[in-house]
Image: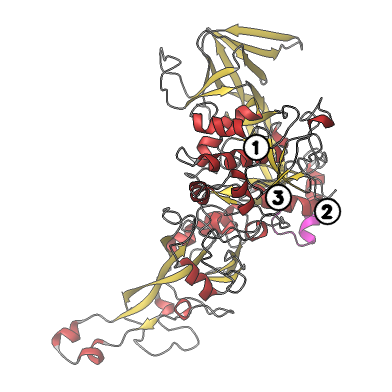
Amino acid sequence: MGLSSFVNRDKAPASPDVSTQRPAFVLSGLTGAAIAAVCWLGMGDRALAQTAAPPNPVLKIGIVQRFGDEPQDVLTLQPAEGDRLSLRFKTDDGQDQTVTTAAPVRVGVVMEPLPEPKVVEKVVLGNHRSFESAEDQANQWRSRGIEVELAQPRQWQVWAKRDTYETPLVRRLLLKNLQAQGARTAFIDRQVQRQVPRAVLEVEGNRLMRDEVEILSSYSRVFVTEGELPPNAARNANVPNRRLYGGSLRLQPNAYGNYTLVNYVPTETYLRGVVPHEIGPSAPPTAVQAQAILARTYALRNLRRFAIDGYELCADTQCQVYKGLTGAVESADRAIAATRGQVLTYRNELIDALYSSTTGGITAPFADVWNGQNRPYLRAVVDSVEGVWDLANRPLSDELNLRAFLNLRQGFNEAGWDSFRWRKESTLENIAEGLRRYLQSQRHPFANLTRVESVQVVERSPAGRVQKLLIQSDRGPITLEKDEILRALYAPTSTLFYLEPVYAQVPIPQNAPSSSAPEDGETGVEANLSPSVSKPSPVATEPDAAETAPIKAAKPAEEATGNSLEAQNRVPTMTVLKGYTFVGGGLGHAVGMSQTGSYRLGRLGWSAARILSFYYPGAQLVTLNENIVFWRDPLN
């Protein structure tokens, strides 16, 4: 979610069969005396009173999520200077064993042949770009009595729970029943395995083959290098792909047949590896404090995300960017310490603390971007302190208002950032290529399309976000909704955009009439165009006239310029649609705080509490305590 990344601050719950409202271990041992005084957002810089140190729960972060996916995958583990690594594991007879070393430990994989091929099947109920939309679909299946679990083999998927639907017959009966009820996205994923990866640890010349290994050190510091460690590399050397992690590590199997390296790390130490990479090194102090509070809230609310794999959070933009202690900076450390234990709540539950790089001038309500219920504290907020736009009287669902809004460049908190306003052109061929890949991942019946003919915005929210995009293809109409638009199309970096058609002049095919309309749609100009050239289809709404303009046949040369020799030799041309320019603003989903916008608010002297109250109206700033619910299952 950092400023340099497309914040998929898109998050959501883990396996939907988890019904606990908060992990029992998080606040164990605390009493009511630990409850902190509540500070309402917007009440200034009043200090938060607290009677005891807030809890510091240990998190489980998947720092290398699918290790062993490739046979050449290698990790190198190394203790800090003067320290030793302890490797703990079970022996073949179930006894605990520990191996201690000061030398680097190489972790690789060998592909172990199976005695006979193994068929691995699962019922996939849906593919999604974000965890939020995947969780919403999972909840819909659960409400219909289907047991499900959330997975992320690459993209987010909803699976029928494997332990429940464990035989081929049961899986096929389930799929047949779902399809009879109109389910279009469900399919059986079937893979035949002939070999499986096995983890191999090399310790001082000895090989250790174990699927689960705990890695600890006396200093609670471990270097991890993705790849081979250069010979004689010093611990303080700048080695590419090497990071220092606090806490301990665990190598463990995941749901996809390979391994995950998990970092067990206290929350406040975890934040040292998140905050500087998310907000950037030059942010004002109060903006960094706001980021620390959000990162802490987000992490603790989302502990269910990777339940299927036995850990809680990832280390990239599908969660929060986390790089361990590598890159930790003093300014972020001060902000983390100053806000220790502080979180945002709404009705005593941690808020969905989403944030993104750049909103484009207006934040998005939750349901503008993902499927699911809106959050009262995630509203459309014009990202300006200068009153540059009256959203109540000029809603951005109106196309003319939206265009006027995106033509404004001054007066917003994000003004001056490159991602605030953008124009990106995409040819019909590029649109077709991205759309085809997306539809293939969805097992869509139109996945073999060869040509895109037109693109139209057919629904837009009052905050300006595209809700439905209609694409006419040679196979038929295709509708993309909300953040799936960004997954299918390369050009836009947010869903706050409008379209400008791009035309080109091309020679009229010799066997096509130069001006008269085709009869019965069979012999006209369009019938002779190459697959990459087509005209826009008519729309049901009232778009810009330019977006629905048909191909225009040029007048013959002699009509235009007389009977000169030059005119007679001129090749007649016609105007055809070649693609679209996406004109928009923002980078990311735009839900919650704008990181670039917080820079300006911080420089205006706003406190962290005031910044957060601006982006999350109605939320409360409190210190973590035993009465706070981390997350409520919406079905319970």
Location of residue 63 in the rendering, given as x and y in whole percent from the top left corner? 58, 30
Q: Amino acid at mark 2?
A: Ser
Disc on the earlier residue, 3 or 1: 1
Q: Is residue 635 magenta?
A: no
- Identify the residue position indicated by label 1 in the image: 296
Q: Is residue 259 above or below residue 22?
A: above
Look at 52% across and 42% down and name the residue there: 2
Asked if residue 45 can be seen in this view, the reply is: yes
Q: Nearer the viewer, mark 2 or mark 1?
A: 1
Q: Amino acid at mark 3?
A: Ala
Start and end of the magenta stretch? 175-186
**Foreground of the two, 4 or 31:** 31
Disc on the earlier residue, 3 or 2: 2
Asked if residue 454 can be seen in this view, the reply is: no
**Foreground of the two, 77 or 149:** 77
Q: Amino acid at mark 1?
A: Arg
Residue 143: image tag: 2
Q: Is residue 549 above or below residue 44?
A: below
Q: Residues within 10 Å of mark 3 (few under 14, many from 20)?
A: many
| Proximity of marks 3 and 1: CB atoms separated by less than 8 Å | no
Q: Nearer the viewer, mark 3 or mark 2?
A: 3
- Separation (CA) of disc 3 from disc 2: 29 Å
Q: Residues within 10 Å of mark 2 (few under 14, many from 20)?
A: few
**SS type, badge 1:** helix
Location of residue 42 in the rendering, given as x and y in whole percent from the top left corner? 65, 50
- Identify the residue position indicated by label 3 in the image: 619
